[in-house]
Image (cartoon, helix red, strand yellow):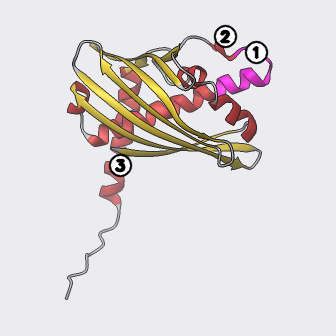
């Protein structure tokens, strides 16, 4: 499943690009992610924890930087993980392109996400909505850490990554789904060409 998302932060391009060079800090912006174990120049291992009420999915996995292009401000990361109780797997190919946006920075993210097992039982729309919510929380976390860095504070002091909370994610994803249905319902009818 391909998911595209755009984020904007007020920090300058060079500061955001430098931040993206610290993979454990970048991962810490995503709720429930911890990739603090560096096992090579470009490879990191760790966990991702998602809690949704009584359901708890904990993935052990790894992420590897496949390409980091200074000239185009592009970073490509491949990640994969297996649910620790053997209920599923996930693979992710991420491409982030940073560009100037006024005085700040725009981050264009393309995710190619493949789920199997328990996580794959949810519909494409729900997974896309939950991913959008997580990326929004990622943007907020990145903003907090970039602000701390700009003030000379160690961004690690912002706090440990917290598990992705199922209740808040589910509520926000449900609002997104309802908005999508409402847009379809209220769009004016447009007849399709008959092909004559």
Q: Position of residue 24 (x, y in %)?
A: 57, 20
Along the viewing direction, whichever of 10 and 77 lies nearer the viewer:
77
Q: Which residue is mark 3?
A: 180
* Quarter residue 192 falls in: bottom left
Q: Position of residue 63 (x, y in %)?
A: 46, 26
Along the viewing direction, whichever of 98 and 105 lies nearer the viewer:
98
Q: Nearer the viewer, mark 3 or mark 2?
A: 2
Q: Residues within 10 Å of mark 3 (few under 14, many from 20)?
A: few
Q: Position of residue 109 (x, y in %)?
A: 51, 43
Q: CA distance from mark 1 to mark 2?
A: 7 Å
Is residue 127 part of the magenta span, yes or no? no
Q: Which quadrant is the N terminus positioned in? A: top left
Is residue 148 part of the magenta span, yes or no? yes
Q: Which residue is mark 2?
A: 157
Horizontal placement of 97 versus 172: left or right? Answer: right
Q: Which residue is mark 1?
A: 153
Magenta residue span: 143-154
* Quarter residue 123 falls in: top left
The numbered mark at residue 109 is none
Which residue is painted at 55% across and 26% down in the image?
A: 42
Residue contact between numbered discs 1 and 2, judged by CB atoms under 8 Å = yes
Determine the secondary structure under disc 3.
helix
Q: Earlier in the sequence, mark 3 or mark 2?
A: 2
Q: Is residue 145 above or below residue 178?
A: above
């Amino acid at each position: 499943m391909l998911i595209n998302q755009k984020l904007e932060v007020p920090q300058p391009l060079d500061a955001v690009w430098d931040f993206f060079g610290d993979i454990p800090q970048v991962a810490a912006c995503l709720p429930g992610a911890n990739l603090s174990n560096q096992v090579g120049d470009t490879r990191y291992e760790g966990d991702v924890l998602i809690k949704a009420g009584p359901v708890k999915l904990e993935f052990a996995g790894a992420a590897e930087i496949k390409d980091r292009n200074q000239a185009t401000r592009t970073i490509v990361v491949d990640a994969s993980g297996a649910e620790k109780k053997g209920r599923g797997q996930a693979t992710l190919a991420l491409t982030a392109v940073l560009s100037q946006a006024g005085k700040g920075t725009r981050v264009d993210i393309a995710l190619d996400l493949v789920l199997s097992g328990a996580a794959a039982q949810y519909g494409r729309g729900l997974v896309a909505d939950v991913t959008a919510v997580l990326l929004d929380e990622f943007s907020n976390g990145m903003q907090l850490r970039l602000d701390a860095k700009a003030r000379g504070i160690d961004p690690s002091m912002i706090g440990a990554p917290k598990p992705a909370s199922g209740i808040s994610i589910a509520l926000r994803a449900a609002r997104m789904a309802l908005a999508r249905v409402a847009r379809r319902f209220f769009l004016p009818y447009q007849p399709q060409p008959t092909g004559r």
